[in-house]
Image (cartoon, rainbow, N blue to C red):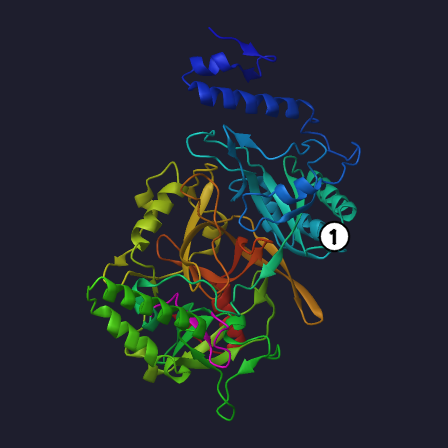
Amino acid sequence: MPRFVENDLEPSVELLIYAGVDPVTAIRRHRRLRSLHRRTKSLPPRTTNMTEQSPMPGPPSEEEARGYYVGLPGKPRLVARSSSDMDPWTGPQTDLGWTLGKTLDPVGQHPIVALWNDSAGPLRRDILDALENIQWVAIDILRLGYQRVKDTMDESPINPVTVLVSVEPGSTTWSTGVEVVLRCRRILRQHGIQDVQVEMKESTISQCNLLTSGPIAQPDKWNSLFSEFLGICIAPAASPYHEGTKGLYLRIRGTKRMLLLTCRHVALTEREANEDFRHSSAADPKKIIQPGTGTLAKACESVNKDIKHSERIMEKNKDLPWASAKLNNLEEPSNRIIGHVLFSPKISEGRSPSGEKRCRDWALIELDQGKHETALENLTNRVFCGMTGKNDTWRATKAELKGCDPEDHYDLEFDDQTHTVELKGTIAKDIMAAPPTESVSLQDPALVVAMHGRTTGLSIGVANEVKSIRRNPVGDLIFKSEEWCILGAKWRSGSGRGPFSGKGDSGSCVWDMKGRIGGMLTSGLEGPAGSLDVSYASPIEWLLADIREQSGLDVELV
């Protein structure tokens, strides 16, 4: 029988092959285990306090700073990391010729979840104190590891839980950054967290609204642009290129008045003073149009190309002339008005009944019956998902979940004629923190979610169990807010993840695979590449409570 090597802590290649592992995978796994074994032999016992007695690590090379996070959509730049003393940079990781990029995953089950999610707890307080003198923008606690290349890499990649501190680009030197991350690591050890490292990177907060016309998700034959469904592009009439997304329909209880929920930074531009806005009949209304002018221009361009192509191949398409006429009629902004801003509080700090801090960034749009074919009282929260929505959501659910029958956790009912799904009910707060299903990547809890936005179209992802913290500078004030952190779905070719959202998706409703409403997309963390590594949403239960308190309106989901 093949032997063990290195004190029987690491199986030899022969033993792995003997155990039924194919030779290529056996060589690769042996190499990884040997590297990990050597690394862990030098670590102090888990029961120690892990004080910083080792020499101060040196700064990252330019190659490490630029290449450390390759694989993440935003490609952020590394500032400093607490693991550089025990895990020095050796260049990009490769496997059988493949360059392995980094990827993020939800934390799952880990002691840090309960400690960090306690908004008044000592761990969060101590970490925030350690960051007091740097220009940080967000704190995310996620698993960070290398992507698994399909058919070439082990099914269980090493992706330890990591505290990721994002700072404004160019604001923090390595010498300052390394002192902060090492201090944060000491704090973690003092609270009994022995297996978590701290990293600092450069990223910025994007509010996910679009100031210019960029790429958009192409709706099926553009029909959805004229529809009453959610997930469609909207914009202020006074700034028609300032585009975002329709979020949710709300009803003022006991009336037929119907409201649309979206972000304040979608409904009102930065030119507006950051103060409470309430509609008054004595003032000009803040009108909202559907779609925005940039999206409409892209639609007209696409339909005209389709018409020319149809003429070239001498094949008539009866839908094209209708779509062209409909789009041309919408070129006049007044023909696209769907309602006006009824109320929007200033962007500020909000609090939940249990004390969690939130960023108050929402607006209520009162809908105009004259612009809707359906009686307003009959509108439902039906979100457009596209022709492939049913297959896409089912495939992503199977890819993310393990150890359970996906059918037990998937209950979306699609309308095959309109390619929509109706949203009902809400995701309870305790489910967000401890989902009942398992993730393939970690064999830990996962909550698969989706949205349809102006830019990304239908997007599927997975929610993190650990709350993220965002730093919000508004005027002369700075306040911190808790955020629901969401990662994009895995690429089909491997375990790397794409962005969940993009600019223009602000206001989108985030929902799970049972059609329950989880929250509203507000922002994301953007890297130099322009893509979002993580997305942030405000939980629906807090939103509804805050709307009732701030507006004085007794609203309910339709």
Query: Can you give x and y, in whole percent of width and height, for residue 445 in the image?
Result: 46, 42
Query: Can you give x and y, in whole percent of width and height, for residue 124 in the image?
Result: 66, 50
* Residue at image point 44% right, 40% down: 439
Query: Can you give x and y, in whole percent of width and height, for residue 495 in the image?
Result: 46, 39
Element carrying mark 1: loop
Residue pointed to by mark 1: 172
| Residue 118 appears in the picture as rendered | yes
Q: Which quadrant would residue 469 be assigned to in this image?
A: bottom right
- Front-lying residue, 62 or 2: 62
* Residue at image point 77% right, 55% down: 133
Q: Which quadrant would residue 358 be assigned to in this image?
A: bottom right
Left/right placement of residue 188 relative to residue 113 reads right
* Residue at image point 43% right, 64% down: 454
Q: Farthest residue toward the top? A: 1
Left/right placement of residue 73 relative to residue 59 reads left
**Is 233 a magenta residue?**
yes
For the record, the magenta segment spans: 229-243
Q: Magenta stretch mostly in which secondary structure? A: loop
Please, is residue 131 above or below residue 216 in the view? above
- Front-lying residue, 52 or 323: 323
